[in-house]
Each structure stands twice: as structure tokens, then as C-alpha cells.
Image (cartoon, helix red, strand yellow):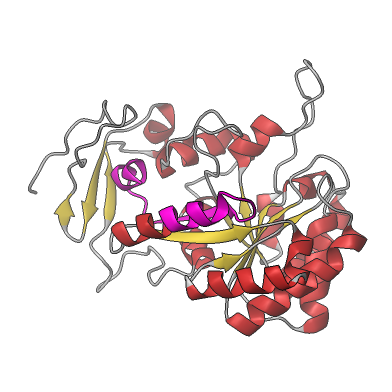
Amino acid sequence: MGLAWASGLRAVRSHIDSLGPAAAVSWEALLELRQRWQGRIELQLVALVPIDHWQAPEGAALARRVADAAGLLGGVLGPGFVAPQAAEAGLLALLRLAEGLGCGVDLHVDEADVQPGVGVSLVSRLVRRHGFGVPLACSHSSSLGLLSAPALERLAEAMAAAGLGVVALPLTNLWLLGRRGEATPSRRPLAPIRQLQRAGVTVAVGGDNVQDPWYPGGAFDPIELLRQSLAAAQLAPWQRLGLAPFTTAAARLLGLAWDGVLRVGAPADLVVLSAGSWGELLARPPQRRVLRAGQWLAPEPTDSPFLAGLSPQPQGP
């Protein structure tokens, strides 16, 4: 969390593997971490389990514990995990539990380069058919980028009608998807951010894995994520819809009290960059000063080698 704090993040959402002998210990440690950082960074925890687990009595018990901890419910959908026809009952159970307990839902869905959009299609269909009103994010949604333009347009409109949001993870998915032995991949799908936005779907861009087995890079740095996503997803941050996935759309999907727009009465929380133009920002990593509640932030003492190179921030105006 020290990396996120020094970089200027104000909220982090994480999928937590919630089955197995280490699950209870993981949740206990993360809830303690959330308490320690309360008032500085909002840590949102999602219980990630195989989708059919929510049908079992153990799934209902887990959902109640997660709701009591102000967490979200999650599951894994799409090729390589479970067939859509087998997933429907589990997803329906998940949505009913979330509705009854007042939980949000964040799914790990369609992170694949085959059978494009099968998971998101199922989610859209069930939400519209049963009228679920829980906040619901479809994280990854990578394979949607392989749909034909007409098919993608139809699905995006269905997603917008169902009120689904999308969290795209371009860096992780560029690293993981399309692998075929030792060959350089020629097809690495990403969530089609701009097409989804045009249909009215709220889309955020996340950093996802940070220096773990799934992605060797990342440092909880939203500015670096923005810089790299320019090439990966062809987003233009000088345009409103190009910047929104890192700012207002992300705040909306996370359900944050402040949307990040500067206005009278807004929190005095800013990331001030040394770049004088978008070109300068994208040309090289800019220096930054982070303002929290009207006070310039100095990095907290840490033994982490990742923070060892951070220079102290100037104090005062």
C-alpha cells in the first residue's frame, strides 16, 4: 500500500482467492491492512471463487461473511474455467446472494483469446432477464476485442442496458494472452474500450497484477499506467473519454464518494506533475508532488526496495 500511497492512488480493489486453507488467513490479513489504511486509501476486497461455489451452502455462508466485511462477491467466467451452460446456475446464485445481501459484484470474465464474449453475454442476459440492480463490474473482458464489429455493437448495447461496467487490464492481458509456445503472439486481445464507451458502458482501466506470477511489472502507479495504456489501447488522454478510464469512470465503478473532478468543496487531494503538456507527460516519467487533504505528502519510511529510490517531496507551498 505504500507504493499506492506514494503514487497518489486513493482506492484499490483486489480479487482475493477465497477457497482453500489459506483463504481465511488472507482475508484476516487484508482486513487488518484495510483498517490500517482507513482514511488514506480505500481497499475494496472481492471474494473470488469458482462460479458454481455460490450454489453450495458453503457459498452462501461465504457470501454472508464477505457482506459482513463490506466486501464484494466475485467469480470466474469464460473459456478455460467453466462452460457457459454450466456457469448459468452458479452466476444466478451469485447474483441472488449479492442482491439479498446488498453486495457489489466484480467478475473475472472472458480473459481469453477464444470464444469471444461468452461470459459477458451470459451476465448481460441474466441481469436483464431477472432485473438485478447490484453494482456489477466485468473485469478483463478481453475476448470482446475479437468480436466482429456488428456482434460487438449488439453486445455492448446489451451491456449498457444491463448497467454493466468494465475494468480493462491492458498491460496484464497483453502479457498473458495469445501465447503459443515460444512464438511472438500476433493476436493479443484487449477489452474494446472505445467501442464500449460509445455504447454507454462505463469503462475503467486498472493496473491489475503488480510484480506477481501473472505480470512481472507494475507499481501501483496510475500515471505510468496511463502512459503505457496510450500505446496498448490507443487511448488519447487529452480527450475526455481517453482520460475518463483513469479518473471519473474508475471512481464511478469503485463507488467512491468523490468523482475526482475539481470543484469548490472537493477534497484537496491532487497529483501535480512536472510535465507542461501531454507530450511531455508521455515522453518520459514526470516528477510528481502528491497533495493529501491539503498537505504535501512525503513518502513514509519503508524497508521496501521499491520505494528506496523515491525522493522526498518538497514541503510547504
Q: Magenta segment: does it hold 27?
A: yes
Give the magenta part as a residue range: 1-30
Q: Position of residue 153 (x, y in %)?
A: 81, 59
The answer to whether residue 272 shows anywhere in this view is yes
Q: Nearer the viewer, residue 152 or 311?
A: 311
Residue 37 visible in the picture? no
Place residue 187 in its image quadrant.
top right
- Comparing 315 with 305, the one in front is 305
- Quarter location, residue 112: top right
Q: Residue at x 26, y 32 (%)?
A: 303
Q: Is residue 196 above or below residue 168?
A: below
Residue at position x 85%, y 56% in the image: 118
Residue 13 as seen in the image, left or right of residue 264: right
Measuring 36% from the left and 38% from the top, which residue is drawn there?
Answer: 277
Q: Looking at this rendering, what residue extends furthest in the left direction?
A: 316
Q: x, y percentage for residue 106?
A: 62, 62
| Horizontal relation, residue 255 to residue 91: left or right | left
Q: Is residue 149 magenta?
A: no
Q: Position of residue 286 (x, y in %)?
A: 32, 33
